[in-house]
Image (tube, rainbow, N blue to C red):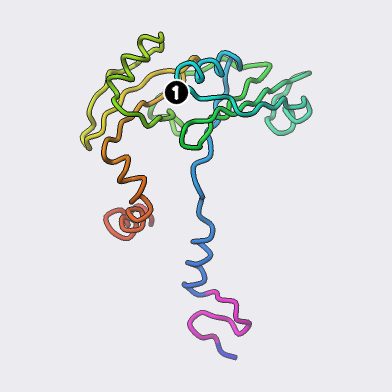
Amino acid sequence: MPERHGARASGVGVGPHAIRKSWQEMRARSFSHTGITVANFNRTVKFYWEVFGCPLVGVADTPPERVKAFFGINADAPACKIGWIRIPGGATIEIFEFQPQLPPGAVPWNRVGLTHIAFNVRNTQKWYDYLVSKGVECVSRPERSPRGHTFFFAKDCDGNLIEMMDLGYMYYVLKWLGPLGGRIFRRGMYQQYYR
């Protein structure tokens, strides 16, 4: 039987429609978590709870054999405590405390890799004042971006950058129209970036 419109005789499609359907079924459902290696597990849990109201929702102690095999930590008796801190909205920060530890290093903006995490908030000036009152190091003051949202950066107890961002009305636009905008922009003004 001859192929018609990219379909095989068996009825299993291999044409553009089948590829598109397969691609649509393989989309990420949501953002799940980001992982951060920390110096002190309890200090980090306390920081995210006392400053941001984010609770610890799970803990696991990793056996030394797994720490060696999975994480590649070459030591006599390596240890890793893992915790999950829930952020409002559903995502989590996964924290890892390893023994032995390597010292932290600077993360320049132009180094390929992760640079920061970000929290959506309302009223960045109020958040800035609050964080300063809690003794949190703020590395910039609130400012307005060229696109209209306000933001500033602070550091957590290990020096990891946290962006505090108030998207204003764009929070609702992205929440409700984000999927539609993604489709429109992918086929329009941002098409060049998908090539």
Residue drawn at x 69%, y 23% is 80
Residue 151 in percent (x, y) is at: 30, 27
In this rendered view, identify the residue nearer to me: 150 or 56: 56
> Dividing the image into 4 quarters, which one contains the C terminus?
bottom left
Magenta region: 3-14
Predominant secondary structure in magenta?
A: loop
Instruction: Report the quarter where the N terminus lies.
Output: bottom right
Question: Callout 1: 10 Å neighbours few (<14), some, many (20+)?
Answer: some
- Which quadrant would residue 124 be assigned to in this image? top left
Left or right position of 119 against 157: left
Point out residue 181 in the picture as x, y percentages from the top left corner: 32, 53
Task: Verify whether residue 148 appears in magenta.
Answer: no
- Report if residue 4 lies within the magenta region: yes
Q: Position of residue 12 (x, y in %)?
A: 60, 77
178 w.r.t. 68: above or below: below
For the residue pair 82 and 8, the one nearer the viewer reads as 82
The residue drawn where x is 49% and y is 31% is 87
Q: Nearer the viewer, residue 155 or 9?
A: 155
Q: Amino acid at mark 1?
A: Val
* Residue at position x 49%, y 42% in the image: 31
- In the image, is residue 41 above or below residue 83? above
Q: Position of residue 187 (x, y in %)?
A: 32, 60
Q: Which residue is disc 1 drawn over?
A: 107
Residue 142 vertical placement versus 22 (above, below): above
Question: Relative to 139, is 79 on the left or the right?
Answer: right
Residue occupying the point 65% across, 26% down: 82
Q: Secondary structure at mark 1?
A: loop
The number of numbered badges drawn on the structure is: 1
